Amino acid sequence: MQQIDRIDRRILDILQRDGRITNLELSDRIGLSPTATSERMRRLLKEGFVTGFGARLDPQRLGFGLLVFVEVLLDKTTPDIFTRFAEAVNRAPEVLECHMVAGGFDYLVKTRMADMAAFRRFLGDVLLSLPGVRETRTYAVMEEVKNDGPLPLA
């Protein structure tokens, strides 16, 4: 892993909180020249410390008010099944995140839907038809307490 210093960490901390900050504003906040700041930014991007930029959207306003986490247990755990499951889940646009986990189940899936009826359709039509799925456990979120926490870099 490449080494980053205190200034790089400060840049990354600021960027994850405000990805639209200008190079001039960023350079003022970290105490470097705009040229030096720009060079550090290019290096951080090139080395993969920054993986992208985007806008945070309001899921409620866009009709995706129901947040659901689903535990997925596979019928067997072989490299072939893991690969087939991962390929299939990556083709499912309804799946926002999917994580292979250690413990009592194999994957944790995060999805957003309009409502419980939409989730029920997704569960039956998409999730349960993914390769190797034996069992699922659904957790509908009642309240999002914290959902945009930045990495604790500073």
Image (cartoon, helix red, strand yellow):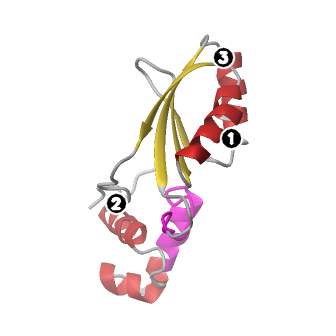
Task: Tell me the SS state at disc 1.
Answer: helix
Q: Which residue is mark 3?
A: 79
Identity of the residue drawn at 34% across and 60% down: 5
Magenta highlight range: 38-60
Residue kind at label 1, given as amino acid type = Asn
Q: Does residue 1 show up?
A: no
Identity of the residue drawn at 48% across and 79% down: 20
> Residue 35 got which mark?
none
Work out whether mark 1 precedes mark 2 in sequence or the reverse, and give the earlier one.
Answer: 2
Residue kind at label 2, given as amino acid type = Asp
Q: CA distance from mark 2 to mark 3?
A: 38 Å
Residue kind at label 3, given as amino acid type = Pro
Q: Tell me the mark number nearer the camera, choosing from 2 and 3.
A: 3
Query: 21 or 91: which is nearer to us?
Result: 91
Q: Which residue is mark 1?
A: 90
- As drawn, is 27 to the left or to the right of 70? left
Q: Which residue is mark 2?
A: 5
Spot occupied by residue 48 in the image (x, y as percentages of width and height): 55, 55
State yes or no: discs 1 and 2 in contact (Cβ < 8 Å). no
